[in-house]
Image (tube, grey):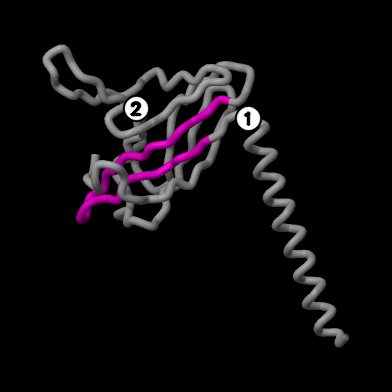
Amino acid sequence: MTRLRLIEIGVAVVLTMVALLFVAWTAWAAEAHGISVTDAWARPTIGKGRTTAAYLTITNEGTTDDVLKAVKSPSAERVDLHETKMTAEGVMQMRPLDKGLPIPAGGTAELKPGGTHVMVMGLKATLAEGGDLPLTLEFAEAGSVDVMVPVRKGAGGDHAH
């Protein structure tokens, strides 16, 4: 075997070990705070739109109740938690969740169209299907959890929220 080939093999082994350590660290970090985020997606923006909504499922795998207090994104000027409810007059109304979203120990919160969701406003660029939207979820107990949210059309079409 040539010396160059041995160096190539050595570099491949080192890169593989680094990748494995990264995966292990990511799994440990997710387990450490007891929060699991699945089924995340955001709607593409329409035209030159700078607003979208993001949806996800949050599971509190810990033994302590927690509250999703805020959501942030480096890609947007403002991100709020909103809930949509039907008024007594039969009108759908969207309101911010100023006190956050409680997630009991062992419980799950599903953020979905027509219900609780993440409202992303003042995007720095449009979002196209196939792209990603970085979000940081800030919990009272678990701290910050970073999530990369894929942009795709959801059930009910691709209309902006």
Provide the secondary structure element on which disc 1 rests.
helix
Q: CA distance from mark 1 to mark 2?
A: 22 Å
**Residue drawn at the location 50% of the way across and 42% of the way down:** 147
Mainly helix, strand or loop, the magenta region? strand
Q: Tell me where residue 39 appears, x and y as whole percent.
A: 45, 40
Taking depth in this image into account, of 90 and 25 the one nearest to the observer is 90
Instruction: Residue 48: say if magenta.
Output: yes
In the rendered image, the vertical position of residue 36 relative to residue 152, given as above or below: above
What's the magenta region? 37-60
Q: Residue 123 versus residue 94: which sits nearer the camera?
A: 94
The front one of 42 and 47 is 42
Counting the numbered discs, the total is 2
Q: Residue 110, position in %: x, y?
A: 42, 29
Amino acid on which the number 2 mark rests in the picture: Thr
Q: Which residue is mark 1?
A: 33
Q: Quadrant of residue 161?
A: top left
- Give the x, y percent position of residue 103: 49, 20
Q: Amino acid at mark 1?
A: His
